């Protein structure tokens, strides 16, 4: 019995001694696990921070480019045209500009004149017909004289020659029709002249620019792009501006020619109808 009691006592002492050791081992293992977790969290945070900084560094050049583009003012078409005009050299650019200004002046003057000359001939002929039905030749002449336009002028000349007979009326209409056509085409020769001169001046600037480029090559003794680029650039710019001037004036010229043709056709129709009105009202005999 004593031996059994002693054995149980020894087992109890061993259990009490062994439990703190196990607790210490478990505590040390838990502490190690906590330290490992903390280290892992710190590593993850550092990697995340580095990735964010790298992303910011990658976005910075693009952001700087975008901000620089936003801050830089965009040039208008007129500003670009002005810069290229100055770069082309004032000697030939100024002459091309003078051709453009004079050509536009003649074109605008012709357009205004032709618009004024475009009169409704049907209303004019109806008024003249009313006066002639009442045997009012003087009233018909006053209506034709007060109406602007080449058709009214031709009709006035025809009415003026009614007392001389049908042959005199026809001759007056034909002769004064040619005069009116000449007046309508007045100034077109100058517009066509500037259309031809502007590209020639541009080509002349091109040739002179190339000569200057070769002179620089001869002086420097080296065929480098920086030496040749200046002269070639001037040469090409003068050609471009000369062609632009010719294109603009050509558009106005074609519009004016079509307007003149339309007015001439109306003049011819009005002249034929006018002769029919004279015959219908027994002003002229067959």
Image (cartoon, rainbow, N blue to C red):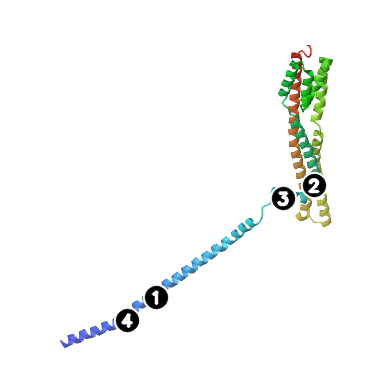
Q: Nearer the viewer, residue 169 or 229?
A: 169
Where residue 93 is drawn, which disc sits there?
Answer: 2
Which residue is labeled 1 in the image? 32
Measured Cα–Cα span from mark 2 to mark 1? 86 Å
Dot 4: what SS? helix
Where residue 79 is drawn, which disc sits there?
Answer: 3
Q: Are marks 3 and 4 in contact (CB under 8 Å)?
A: no
x, y percent for residue 243: 76, 42
Q: Are marks 4 and 1 in contact (CB under 8 Å)?
A: no
Residue shown at 47% from the left, 68% from the top: 45
The residue mark sitting in front, 2 or 1, is: 2
Measured Cα–Cα span from mark 1 to mark 3? 73 Å
Dot 2: what SS? helix
Dot 1: what SS? helix
Is residue 141 shown above or below 231? above
Measured Cα–Cα span from mark 2 to mark 4? 102 Å
Is residue 211 shown above or below 14? above
x, y percent for residue 109: 78, 36
């Amino acid at each position: 019995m004593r031996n059994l009691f002693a054995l149980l006592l020894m087992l109890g002492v061993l259990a009490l001694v062994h439990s703190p050791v196990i607790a210490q081992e478990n505590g040390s293992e838990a502490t190690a696990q906590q330290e490992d977790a903390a280290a892992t969290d710190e590593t993850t945070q550092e990697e995340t921070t580095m990735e964010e900084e790298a992303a910011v560094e990658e976005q910075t050049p693009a952001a700087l480019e975008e901000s620089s583009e936003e801050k830089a003012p965009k040039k208008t078409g007129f500003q670009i045209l002005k810069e290229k005009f100055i770069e082309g050299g004032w000697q030939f650019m100024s002459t091309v500009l003078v051709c453009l200004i004079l050509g536009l002046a003649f074109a605008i003057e012709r357009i205004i004149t032709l618009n004024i000359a475009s009169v409704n001939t049907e209303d004019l002929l109806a008024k003249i017909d009313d006066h002639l039905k009442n045997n009012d030749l003087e009233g018909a002449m006053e209506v034709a004289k007060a109406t602007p336009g080449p058709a009214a002028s031709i009709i006035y000349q025809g009415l003026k020659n009614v007392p001389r007979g049908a042959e005199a009326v026809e001759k007056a209409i034909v002769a004064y029709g040619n005069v009116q056509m000449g007046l309508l085409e007045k100034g077109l020769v100058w517009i066509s002249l500037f259309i031809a001169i502007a590209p020639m001046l541009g080509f002349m600037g091109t040739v002179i620019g190339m000569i200057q480029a070769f002179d620089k090559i001869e002086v420097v003794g080296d065929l480098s792009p920086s030496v040749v680029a200046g002269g070639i650039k001037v040469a090409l710019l003068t050609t471009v501006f000369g062609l632009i001037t010719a294109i603009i004036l050509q558009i106005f010229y074609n519009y004016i020619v079509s307007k003149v043709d339309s007015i001439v056709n109306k003049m011819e129709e009005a002249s034929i109808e006018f002769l029919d009105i004279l015959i219908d009202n027994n002003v002229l005999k067959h």
